[in-house]
Amino acid sequence: MMTTVFNIENLNLFYGDFHALKNIDMVIYKNQVTALIGPSGCGKSTFIRCLNRMNDLIPEAKMEGCVRFDGEECQIGGYDVIGLRKRVGMVFQKPNPFPMSIFDNVAFGPRQQGIKQKEVLQGIVEKALKQAALYEEVKDRLTSSALSLSGGQQQRLCIARALALEPEVILMDEPTSALDPLATQRIESLINDLKEDYTIVIVTHSMQQAARISDYTAFFYMGELREIDTTEKIFKAPRLKQTEDYITGRFG
Amino acid sequence: MRKKPWRQVILDGATYLATLLSVFALGMIFFYVIREGAHLLSFDLLRGDYHARGFVGLVEEETQGSFNLTGQQGENRYLVERLGLVLEQSFDLAGDGVIKVAYIDEASPLRRLTNQDPTSEQSFIGLETGAVLRRVSYVDHPTSLTSRGAASMARDMNDPDRALREVIFSTEGGGIRGSLITTLYLIFITLAIALPFGVLTAIYFNEFAPINRVTKAMRNFIETLTGVPSIIYGLLGITVFVPLTVRLTPAENANLIAGGLTLAVILLPVIIRTTEEALKVVSQDHRFASLALGANKTQTTFKVVLPQALPGILTATFLGIGRVIGESAALIFVLGAAIRDSVRIFEPSTSLAVHIWSMMTDEPANIALSSTIALIILLIVLTLNLAIKTTVWAFDWKGRRS
């Protein structure tokens, strides 16, 4: 039996009057890559933002139901969101490094946690950059601006920045949609490596990507979770006709 | 080629014409102040006292002599061989016509005069090169006045029949050092108050404030305040800040602190608005990225958002300094219109702009010096502008260099 990281029970989310997520029940397993697929506006990005409570930042978003992280209590009300975000990192669609040096970008998270000693930070930064397979490329110019990196490098820097906090889960919201095929390939192989130590939840529009990198695939449609299973099953023998139609490109 | 439709021709023409007129009007300002005021621009003007110090010296004994003044001739110079003195028809720092001592011989009797100032401990005073001669009186002869010119004064002094009685002279006045220092003080005091308040208020409105009717009303209110004439702020200053400073500080009247406070209130809306604009353009992605890294709102605001808004805040600072330098109406109330040479923060003084006002309300108006001060103000603004641009550029470079 695999350990679960997230247990989502009867999750509903409203943007004002719009019912964006409808009665989602789902489990996310530890050290597995779970891919979220579905047509635009189906709620997969909204769902991933429920996992680290980024939806809290949207004033009109209202969350109901239960997201249990690591067997904790329901994350509603006075939940320690900051503490959660340290343990559940996130990588965004567009690479968004801060306009600081490469070093300062990776050290940002630990610094906000109060880590000040230069040697400690250096260790953390080096480790995170190595994990994100970026270290060799930037080790000689850690003090140059992060904005001088290429798009693919910037995205790996963002991954390193998330890794520097040693999270348990990394959420990726279409992390390769702004990148060229080569950079995409590097990120995908990186995800494969990171699986050893981290749980990864990834939103993707590319069926091939989901098939290549994920262990589990969840198909969202119109705010509902229509089907979730191992990636193999979803792609070879989906339960629903709709899932098959989407995967084979008949709609979406 | 297809002919342009007439509407476009008119629109394009209007654009060119408007630009031409704008540039012309702005260029005229420079042209005018340079033409009128450039000749008075000097370091002595910036360094000099405004108030001339006057002396009255009694000629006790007059040694009749004849000094050799060869080599001292020149344009507008008049030799007084009898006293070893060369007078020059000249201008003081403020551009007023004066008679200056261009040269005085070591052995001249006017080097040693009895001081007529009873309050002074000094019993003897003497004319020196650079002194301004105001009046020379004689025994049984009419007095020589500045208004009659250096030629007439030199002729009178050279007349062996006239026995000198009293020489009234002064240091050269008309400098603007006091007003310059006041302006610098004002900039410092005002920004020290307005910047932290303004920037923090802008941060509150842009980062923390809920969007509701109350905050919207507050924003509109602040926006309205940018359009209020400064003389109204001057009234606020004289009814609130002057009494307040008189009560809490050694000040007895209008003073620099009250001036700084009043200007700070004038600046607040400008700084709040400009800073808010700067905060608005900081990418939302960076806020999300920071929050997703477990940073809280305060950390995100001060470590990620604010550094990126710094160029905008520098612009706000620059605009603020411009307002401080340019303000006159409000300051006449709260800082006074008395030009001072030694500036103290608890006493009245004048800024450069008020100095101009003071020169122009003189009888007759001193347009030349006013233009010179205007030129100095323009130069200060220009320098600051360049400084800010360089700083912003340096910040940009630091963020983007490869």
Image (cartoon, grey):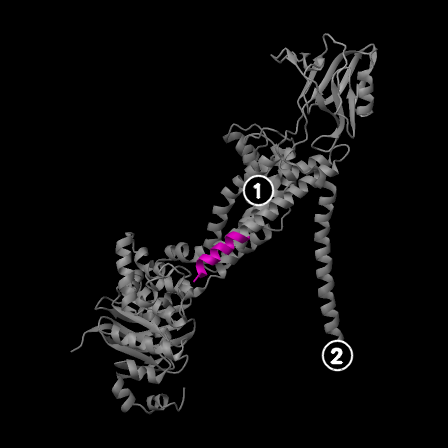
The magenta segment is B389-402
Q: Which residue is mark 2?
A: B3
Residue B206 position within the rendered picture, expressed as x and y whole percent measured from the top left: 47, 57
- Tags 2 and 1 touching, CB below 8 Å: no
Residue A38 position within the rendered picture, expressed as x and y whole percent measured from the top left: 36, 82
**Could you classify mark 1 by the number of other residues whose Cα lies within 10 Å: few (under 14), some (14-19), or many (20 or more)?**
many
Q: Main secondary structure of the magenta part?
A: helix
Q: Tell which subunit mark 2 falls on.
A: B
Residue B393 falls inside the magenta stretch: yes
Q: Residue furthest left?
A: A1
Residue B386 position within the rendered picture, expressed as x and y whole percent measured from the top left: 57, 51
Amino acid of disc 2 = Lys
Quadrant where the N terminus of chain B sits is bottom right
Image-based side of B170 in relation to A184, left or right: right
Q: Residue at x 35, y 88 (%)?
A: A247
Q: Are marks 2 and 1 on the same chain?
A: yes
Q: Which type of secondary structure does the marked residue at label 1 adopt? A: helix
The part of the image, by quadrant, that contains residue B161 is top right
Give the answer, above or below, for where B285 lies relative to B268: below
The answer to whether one can see residue A64 in this image is: no
Residue B113 falls inside the magenta stretch: no
The part of the image, by quadrant, that contains residue B150 is top right
Q: Which residue is mark 1?
A: B263
Looking at the image, is mark 2 or mark 1 earlier in the sequence? Answer: 2
Give the answer, above or below, for where A226 lies relative to A174: below
Mark nearest the camera among 2 and 1 is 2
Image-based side of B183 in relation to A202, left or right: right
Amino acid of disc 1 = Leu
How many numbered discs? 2
